[in-house]
Amino acid sequence: MPISSDFTSIFQHNFEIGFQHCYPTGFLKHTEICNLFQIVAGMHADLGGISYLDMQQHHQAWVLSRMRIEITKVPKWKDVITIKTWIKTLENSRSIRCLEMYLNDEKIVGCETFWVVINTKTRRPDILALPHNHFEKFDTDSISNPIQKINIPEAFTFKNERNILLSDIDIVNHANNVKYLEWCLDVTNVETVLSNTIKALNLNYLQELNFNDAIEIHHTENQFLITKEGKSCFALEIEI
């Protein structure tokens, strides 16, 4: 698709929080924070001519590698929020995208995401084939602490098992990145999730998962490791 006449290097979009996005408490689910960020990033990529469909002409797609979300306040049902996004760096096969969520002009969530271009035929990193110089790059942080590589503990207290279902799979034919967080939050302490005490989420994506894969979720109260056949696929650290 050609670059839209509405394209701007800093993009923003408004959402009204619907009941389907919320916990029983009425507050926005942590997974929906990720979903809304993913939607806005996709909209910006569409306008700028580097969307999934554009990239598939070269058998390429963006794959999320690392993500950090810092939460000051969680919006609730019927709140109207604004999400802003911009690209911090984009070079060769790698890009850092920043996102921020606002409520009544107050920044309530900051996020930084690290993406890699993957060739969907070889499943290997690939240099972005599409032009992107029209995207101005902004060396502006959206989070207080940088994206982190998680130090995985040697021992975990709990272990859960599951298989990857059809509902977990996205258009790139692997488990959607939001699903990893969902699986972990489903096996942690419910009160931790519902009490709005989570201040930050660190997410590391290490290996993609596919339909019918059998996985194990190893975890303590705030650290999680998803493995497949003994190999690490995803790590999560919750900051309270």
Image (cartoon, rainbow, N blue to C red):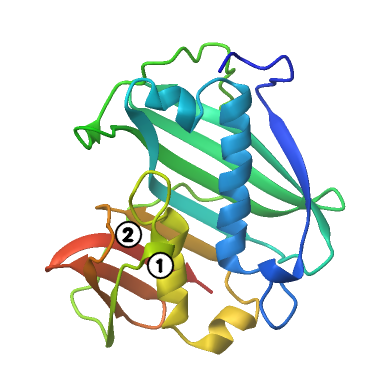
> Number of labelled discs?
2
At 23% from the left edge and 32% from the top edge, which residue is drawn?
121
Left or right: where 97 falls relative to 157 = right
Residue at numbered disc 2: 150
Q: Are marks 1 and 2 in contact (CB under 8 Å)?
A: yes
Q: Residue furthest left?
A: 230
Left or right: where 220 falls relative to 111 = left
User: Is 128 above or below relative to 71?
Assistant: above
At 64% from the left edge and 82% from the top edge, which residue is drawn?
195
Residue type at the position of mark 2: Ile
Image x and y of residue 219, in percent: 32, 79
Label 2: few (<14), some or many (≥20) within 10 Å?
some
User: Is 236 above or below relative to 35?
Assistant: below
User: Is 83 above or below relative to 21?
Assistant: above
Q: Which mark is residue 237?
A: 1
Identify the secondary structure beneath mark 2: loop
Residue 148 in view, yes or no = yes
Residue 142 in view, yes or no = no
Q: Nearer the viewer, residue 31 or 122?
A: 122
Image x and y of residue 4, in percent: 67, 17
At 12% from the left edge and 68% from the top edge, which residue is drawn?
229
Residue type at the position of mark 1: Glu
Q: From the image, which quarter does the C terminus lie in?
A: bottom right
Left or right: where 101 falls relative to 230 = right
Q: Earlier in the sequence, mark 1 or mark 2?
A: 2
Q: Quadrant of residue 63?
A: top left
Q: Quadrant of residue 74?
A: bottom right
Q: From the image, which quarter does the N terminus lie in?
A: top right
Q: Nearer the viewer, residue 239 or 76?
A: 76
Image x and y of residue 82, in percent: 77, 47
